[in-house]
Amino acid sequence: MLILGADLATNRRRTSVKWRAFPEDVLPLWVAEMDATLPPAVVEEVHDLLTRGDTGYAWPGEYVAAFTEFAADLWDWSVDPVQCRTVTDVMVGIEEMTRILLPDGGRVIIDDPVYDAFPLHIENIRRDTARVPLTAEGRLDLHQLERAFAEARADGSPAVYWLCNPQNPTGTVPTKNELTALAEIAHRTGVRVVSDEIHAPLVDVHADFVPYLTVDPRGITATSPSKSFNLAGLKAGLVVAGEEASDALAALHPVVSYAASHVAIRAHTVAYREGRDWLEQVRAEIRDNRALLGDLLAEHLPKARWREPQATYLAWINLTHLRLGSQPARTLAKRARVALGEGANYGPSGQGYVRMNLATSPEIIREAISRIDDLVDDWQE
């Protein structure tokens, strides 16, 4: 039975933002949440918690242990539990650690394109922003990063680079050589790296995920199973500090940990420990959906350009040659009734692109491409 097999009528009963932000005749393939049935053990755990009224304040003990076991098993990464702290979610963890690293202002450097919430969170903590374009292949441009790091540090001000590993929206996975070079540049220029690794469990079997802290003891990572197990509405995450970043971790105020949800921590713990078979199946279904999208684009939208991602369940598609205007996602939502992520929201280099969520049923993906194809045919007549 497919994890991502629910039909349109079934998914319409969902009440999350993905399915409620647009009118019912719009296919929502924009925000990064799955149309998935959850791991049975997670469902059972949450049901048991609610049945016995076990919904008090969080006790995080097993959460850290479950993560360290998962990281060792999946990535051969030995994580010291002492270097971990529970946080409300990944972006809260990134924000709070950045406040600590940049106490009196400074610059946050990000990719272009990159996760569209990054600029909003930088604005929230009132720090300056600098963008560094990725290469044409969607990979880290180490020369441009070194230049941006040096520029940010030229007057002695502190700077932080928010690494997106794996990269969102392109789905590329930095290699060990790339990350090692990045760490060397960061050390040489005095920039601290905070790595968002929320998509790490969704790296395809044909790519190797390298945790950033395995190459940089000064780094900080934020992670959570919320993305890979579709638990975004159950708020919890972890911050992990490299062995030379203990001082920054010690400065994290305990109140940041208190806000994590008890139900979330229990659900996340069970996902880490008992959700591996489910994760392997959902990764296989995402892989099949990528192949399906490739076939559909080749058949119906040959002018669309994309590179099959190595990770995530997102597709980064260049629609420039379809001549749908500077905001193709807006056009498609209005005219084709398909909601996708607007490429320009991920950075200036994303203009003309869209981000498409593939963590849904093959039926919905086929319908979305059919609607876009019909619009393009009408648009260009």
Image (cartoon, helix red, strand yellow):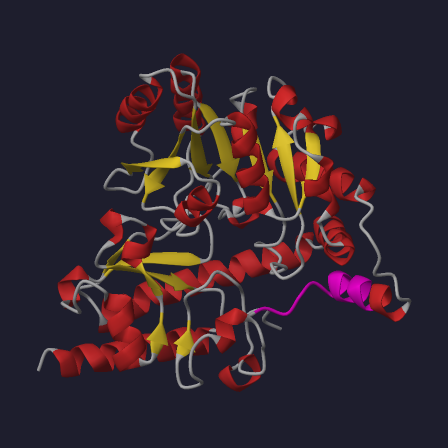
Q: Is residue 205 above or below residue 44?
A: above
- Residue at the far top in the pictured view: 188
Image quadrant of residue 374? Answer: bottom left
Q: Is 42 within the magenta?
A: yes
Q: Residue furthest right?
A: 52
Question: How many circles with numbers are drawn on the protein?
Answer: 0
| Left or right of 225 in this view: 361 | left
Q: Measured from the top left, where is residue 290 in percent x and y?
A: 40, 61
The reply to whether residue 71 is in sight is: yes
Residue 179: percent from left, percent from top: 43, 27
Which residue is depicted at the point 77% across and 61% down?
A: 41
Determine if the magenta segment contains residue 50: no
User: Farthest residue in the front direction?
Assistant: 104
Secondary structure that dominates the magenta span:
helix
Who's the residue at 62% across and 27% down the image? 241
User: Is 190 placed left or right of 35 in the picture?
Assistant: left
Residue bounds of the magenta highlight: 36-47
Picture layout, residue 312 above or below residue 64: below
The C terminus sits in image quarter: bottom left
Is residue 210 visible to the viewer in this orientation of the structure? no
